[in-house]
Each structure stands twice: as structure tokens, then as C-alpha cells.
Image (spheres, rainbow, N blue to C red):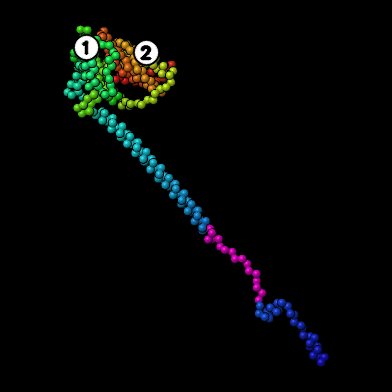
Amino acid sequence: MQQRSDRLKKKPKKSLSIWNITKKFGFERQSKDKAQKIPKAHSLNLKQAKTLMMIFLVALFVYFGYVLLLANSAVHNNHALKHQITVLNTKLEKASQGTTSYNPIVGQYLAGFLTTYYTFNTSENDTRTQELQKYFASNLHVSNSVRMTDQTFKSGKLQGIFLIDGVKTAQYDIVVNSDNKDVNMTVNVPYSQKNAQLTVVGFPYVANPIDSLGHVDKARLQQNQKQLNDEDIKARVTTFTNRFIKKYVSSSTKDMSMMMKDPVGLDGTVTLENVDNVNVSGSTEKPVVTADITVNVKDTNIKQVQTVRLELEKQASTYFVIKLVQA
């Protein structure tokens, strides 16, 4: 009995811990689950796709803007080319209307015009005016305000047909009888021709004889000038214009070199009666003047109205004539 009790004493007692109970009944201790990280590859790909899409849209916008710019530029260039073609066609048509060489139609027409224009009878003035309107352009009218004496056109000789500012101009040496005295004059007649139709587009004006020796200059361009509204400048330009025209009709070509780029003077072949309808346009530095002048042929009672245009350039306190055009 004592031995048995000794064995019982020697046998260790088993602990009833939670671990032993769990192991005994087959339960395992569960480890704490950790949160699984989701790969970021998908979110990165989506962001890149958005970036690429934005770049594509911006590039597409820039491309269409560039295409639109090219289209507008092409339209603008087409309009400019059409305008240039129209201008060139107009100039070509104007230059090709008829010929600058003599032909019987031009000779007969201008002979009839000069005969009517330089033949004046105070008792038949209205008839003369009606006949002249058949020759003149529709917007060019004969003035009856100029007092004239009876005169007769005796003869005329065509010296040449040439272009002044793109307008065909015939130059004639004519003989007019006034007060029983024959007077020789050189006159220019601006006219236009289309096929067999002719029209006088400016009053005949006294001119210097044609000098065929010289260099061919650049084509002259018409200028559209805005009206000059500065009254002080207009007054100065008008004063200069009156002084210039007086000198022009009375001085030689050599004397006019101080006032003109291409000097010309009538050297007293006519006397100035009056200057009317002075119109100043252009700019302060480069004004343009148009005026009607009435001249009297020297030693006669022959008077006629001429239109002049002066293109000026300001120099110090005065002006310099860049170009003189008569019509």
C-alpha cells in the first residue's frame, strides 16, 4: 500500500491549461489575419490612360486649329489673288482698248471733236454745247461761264497717241483763227476707246510738244486719297497751288526745276485767267490737289478750261511737286 501510494506520489499531475484542452479536443489556435494589399498596377494604368487621352485631345484640338488657320489663310490668299486678277484685267482691258498707233477711226473722231470744240459762234453756243456732249463722257459737262469770242478751227495735225496715267492721249498741232488771226497751238486730248466706240474723257489742254527721246518709266498707279480736313494745311496748300500754277504757265521748263521733280513749263504760251474748284486730299506730308484752271492763249482771245492734279511733298515751310497731271 505504501508502494502504491509512493507511485501515486511520483506520478506528476497533468495541467489542465487552455492549450492542453484545445489540443485535446482538436482546436487550433488561429493566427490573426493581416489585410491583403491590393496591387496598384490597375490604378496606375487607368491614370496613364487618362493622361494619354488628354494628350490626344489636346493634339487633336491643336491640329484642327492649325487646319482651320491654313484654311482661313488659303481663303484670304484666294481673295487677294482674285482682287489682283481683277485689277490686272481692268488695267489690261483699259490699256488694250484700241491702239496707241494711228488708225482712221481715231483720226476722224478726234478731227470732228476738235473742229467742234475750237469753233465758237456766240449766236450758236447752245448748239455747240449739245454737239460737244456727244463726244464727252457722260459725267463731263461743258461750262458756259467762260466768255469766248468767235473763233474757227482751221486745221490740225496728229503728232502722236500715247498714254498718260493709263489714259490714251492724242497730241495735235492745231491752227485756230481768232480775230482774223491764225494761232498755232499744241494740245492734248484724253480719250478712251472700246472697239469702234470712242469717248473724250477730259478737256483738251495746251501742252508741250512730244519729245520721243527718253527712258520708259515705271507704270503709274492711281491713288485713292482721303479728304484732308485740316483747314490750316488746306489753306497753305491752296496758296502754294495758286503760286505754282502762275509760275507754271509763265516759266520755262528749266525755271520749274526748283519746284518740280519732273520740271515742265508752258513758257508764257498761255496766260492764267483763274483757278477754281481747288480740292485738297491726301495727308499732311503728301497732299494731293486737283483744280480747274482757265487759260488764255497768248496774243489771242482764245480761252479754255483745264483740270490739273498736283501730287505734293512737304519740304520745310513749302511744298515740292512730285507729279503734275493734266486732263
Residue range of the region highlighted in magenta in the rendering: 28-44
Q: Main secondary structure of the magenta part?
A: loop
Label 2 to label 1, Cα distance in Å? 37 Å
Label 2 sits on residue: 243
**Nearest to the observer: residue 85 or residue 152:** 152
**Residues marked 2 and 1 touching at CB (< 8 Å):** no
Please state if 97 lies on the left or on the right of 23 as rendered.
Answer: left
Residue 71's place in the image compared with 305, above or below, is below
**Nearest to the observer: residue 248 or residue 241:** 241
Mark 1 or mark 2, which is nearer the start of the sequence? 1
Query: Residue 41: percent from the left, percent from the top?
Result: 53, 61
Query: Residue 241: percent from the left, percent from the top?
Result: 37, 16
Visible in this render: residue 210? no
Which structural element holds mark 1? helix
Query: Residue 260: percent from the left, percent from the top?
Result: 35, 17
Residue positioned most to the right: 2
Q: Residue at x 42, y 22 (%)?
A: 229
Label 1 sits on residue: 123
> Which three-letter amino acid code belongs to the residue tagged 2?
Arg
Label 2 crowd (10 A; few <14 / some 14-19 / many >=20): few
Q: Residue at x 26, y 11 (%)?
A: 148
> Which three-letter amino acid code belongs to the residue tagged 1?
Ser
Rendered-image quadrant of the N terminus: bottom right
